[in-house]
Amino acid sequence: MTIHDTAIPHIDTALEPFAGADELRQRWRALMGPLGFSESLLWFSVIDTDNRFGPPLHQVELPALPDDVLSDLLMSNLGRTLGEIRELSVAMLLTRPGRDGVTADDMTWAQMLTRDARRHGVRLHPIHRANDSELVALTIADAAA
């Protein structure tokens, strides 16, 4: 199903608690505002115990093709940073230019990040992807960490 975003939730809703992938999608949509991207980025934030975004919102520039080393390094660092505070979790959004649907590269990124999160003990919410026309959850057959 393709969701073409027309209504942008008010930015104030971005800090409300969320329950599930669809409400998380709405929080990402409020944070992103009008869609349109000039480069590929991975956005992420630590999510508190009440399922709210915690500042700051981080960005990592992504290479043209999915990169195992970058995924592993990011999740390793997040695992060490979160340390003993296992109640915290992480939300991630892949953004890139284009109007196409979900690509094999989008899914590969999501699969790698999910795998590496599990390996490094990072609790991860469903990963989302935004391009110039839509923001959607990426469904991973194997549940996230």
Image: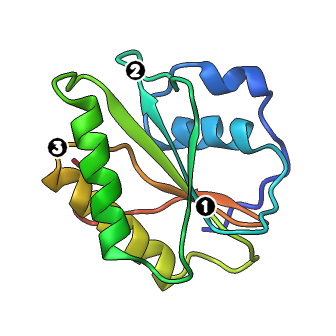
Q: Earlier in the sequence, mark 3 or mark 1?
A: 1
Classify 89 as above or below 75: above
Disc 1 crowd rating (10 Å Cα; few below 14, some 14-19, many 20+) is some
- Residue 123 visible in the displayed image: no
**In front here: 74 or 50?**
74
Q: Position of residue 31 (x, y in %)?
A: 70, 37
Residue drawn at point x = 85 percent, y = 50 percent: 34
Q: Amino acid at mark 2?
A: Asp
Q: Amino acid at mark 3?
A: Gly
Q: CA distance from mark 2 to mark 1?
A: 23 Å
- Kindly identify which residue carries mark 3: 121
- Residue 127 visible in the displayed image: yes
Q: Quadrant of residue 33?
A: top right
- Kindly identify which residue carries mark 2: 48
Q: CA distance from mark 3 to mark 2?
A: 16 Å
Mark 1: secondary structure: strand
Residue drawn at point x = 53 percent, y = 38 percent: 24
Colour convention:
rainbow
- Kindly identify which residue carries mark 1: 41
Q: Residue furthest top?
A: 50
Q: Earlier in the sequence, mark 3 or mark 2?
A: 2
